[in-house]
Amino acid sequence: MNVKKLFLLRHAKPFFGFVDPGLGDCGKEQARKLADLLKENLIGVPDSDITIWTSAARDAVETSLIILDVFPDSDLATYKKLGDGIKNDWDFDWLIEKLDNFEGQILIIVSHLEYVQRFPRVLEFLENSSDYAQGVLIEDDNCFNFYSY
């Protein structure tokens, strides 16, 4: 993996009871707090050095767009293989290959709980607990819990 810092984050809290829900007011506030925490962690890093990948699910896309507001010159890409919010086929081999070919420095991935909890294990890190708008930071061959509140 060539990434200097990899933030693997769960989307903020969605509306419940809907198929492919967007963020409610609470979720939007969580996403703003998460974006602020990312900004604090990336002081001095030019936005152009930051790439954001998001799941195709509406809650993840909306979380990513709020993060993009804080890093407006970052690249944003949406991938169904990071989960679409309806049928989640977790393709960790795809993500490993994608990471091996990634040429940037800082990568923020906004996906779902399963990615935050399971993917670090695929990279041989211990399983991490996570809740809404929380995740992990993988840096210097270490995996740290990264919380937004």
Image (cartoon, rainbow, N blue to C red):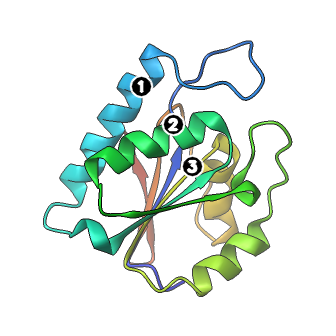
x, y (%) of residue 33? 30, 33
The residue lying at 20 percent from left, 69 percent from top is 45
Kindly check if marks 1 and 3 are in contact, taking CB atoms under 8 A apart as contact. no
Image quadrant of residue 87?
A: top right
Q: Nearer the viewer, residue 119 or 2?
A: 2
Residue 62 numbered mark, or none: 2
Give how far across and how far down residue 123 sits, in percent.
63, 72
Q: Say if 128 sits above or below 2 in the image.
A: above
Residue hosting label 1: 28
Of tags 1 and 3, the one toward the viewer is: 1
Give the quadrant of the C terminus. Answer: top left
Nearer-N-terminus badge (2/3): 2
Q: Quadrant of the N terminus?
A: bottom right
Where residue 140 appears, as percent x and y from the top left, is 38, 78
Q: Is residue 112 above or below residue 14?
A: below
Residue 128's tag is 3
Q: On the picture, is 124 further left or further right than 70?
A: right
The type of residue carrying mark 3 is Asn
The reply to whether callout 2 and callout 1 are in contact (CB within 8 Å) is: yes
